[in-house]
Image: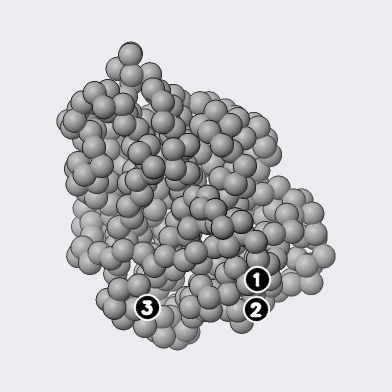
Amino acid sequence: MSEKLKNNLNVSDLFISKNFSKFLFFVNVFLVFMTFENIKCAPILLEKLNYNINGLPIYTINLNIPVKERYAELLTKYKKHIKALAFFSSLKPLGNVMSKFSEYAISTIGNQDPEWFEYVKAVSEYADITLSEAIMISITYDMACTTAIAQNTKTGEIIMGRNLDFGTYFINSHMNFEAHYYKDGKYLFKAIELAGFRGIINGTKSNKFSVSLNLRKKKSNFSFMNIYRVFRGYPTPNYYLYKVMLQAENFEEAVKLFSNNIISAPVYFAISGIQKNEGVIIERDYNKVDFIDQLDVDKGKWFLVICNTDSKIEEKKEDWRRKPAEERLEMIGEQNINYFNFFDNVMSLFPNNNIFTIYTTIQSAQSNGYFNTTAWMP
């Protein structure tokens, strides 16, 4: 880990201050309200004031050891951040309710995947928060994002760009890490995760496929329903992404798994492979697929972009990042797209990179896997 990043992590001492946490809460509420109520304010409120960038710390995850031991180092490292997030969540009505019924959570979560629950218990222990607070953090699903897939029609390279935007930016921007997974001494895949959240946001399995997920906004996508479905035993989208990374051995298997399972919340799964036209965005509801958008380079469809609105719906003012990304990809061109102009001319520019953007990843499963993440630090 760089010295600069270590120094940045020391700001966590501020987050355990009750008054400062309340201040962050109202700042976030104000920014979200102004953004969604008056998009004309966006350039003033949301464009980054600085571009202080770093790489992410890397942790090796050994799947041959118990869950609690796998994550001991990183959960201890991020203890103050997790505690701050738990406090921040408790300021919201739903979070306050969740913090009151630990015993109920323990008794009803039994249908959930044992590995998921073991991780939640480890978060509770290492971060010194209640079990229900740890559950609330792990099922948080407020990920406003940009994911784009593009295939260079000259080289055949399929590239995925991924930005994570999060409302609690000032806390979450210090909780990201790059995880390298191993089993039986063999390297499996790499992914980006948030400490305290069980599951993967985006990742790459070399020479096989890359994946990313985005929050899908639907009228039925309300928090109580999502929490109820977690208690029923349905996996969160990011935990299911982790399970697919373990199971799938190629693009087709990944697409099939992402299409068929029942999950706890609506989501967009983006998957890219290594062959021509192996790029899809799956619009998932709780129990089924609503739509699959796929590359078709022979018909001029060499890129796909998804944020938080269905691709068939004209972009609303609440989701104003998709069209700029599409226009910039068009300007680059299907024979010129590469890792560097994807980052420089699309993913790192406003509005796709805004005040809530925590990191940007450019990734590809081809050529033994390209995976480069830039963390935008406050």
Residue sitting at 28 percent across and 65 percent down? 54
* Label 2 close to label 3 by CB (< 8 Å): no
Quarter in which the N terminus is drawn: bottom left
* Label 1 close to label 2 by CB (< 8 Å): yes
Residue 250 coordinates in the image, percent (x, y): 53, 33
Residue sitting at 47 percent across and 60 percent down? 179
Which residue is disc 3 drawn over?
Answer: 9
Can residue 89 be seen in the rendering of this structure?
Answer: yes
Can residue 324 be seen in the rendering of this structure?
Answer: no
Quarter residue 44 falls in: bottom left
Label of residue 125 in the image:
2
Residue 198 coordinates in the image, percent (x, y): 59, 60
Mark 1: amino acid? Lys
Whichever of callouts 2 and 3 sits on the residue coming sooner in the sequence is 3
Whichever of callouts 3 and 1 sits on the residue coming sooner in the sequence is 3
Is 266 on the left or on the right of 26, as rendered?
right
Whichever of callouts 1 and 2 sits on the residue coming sooner in the sequence is 1
Q: Between tags 1 and 2, which lies in front?
A: 1
SS category of the residue bearing label 3: helix
Residue sitting at 21 percent across and 53 percent down? 43
Which residue is disc 1 drawn over?
Answer: 68
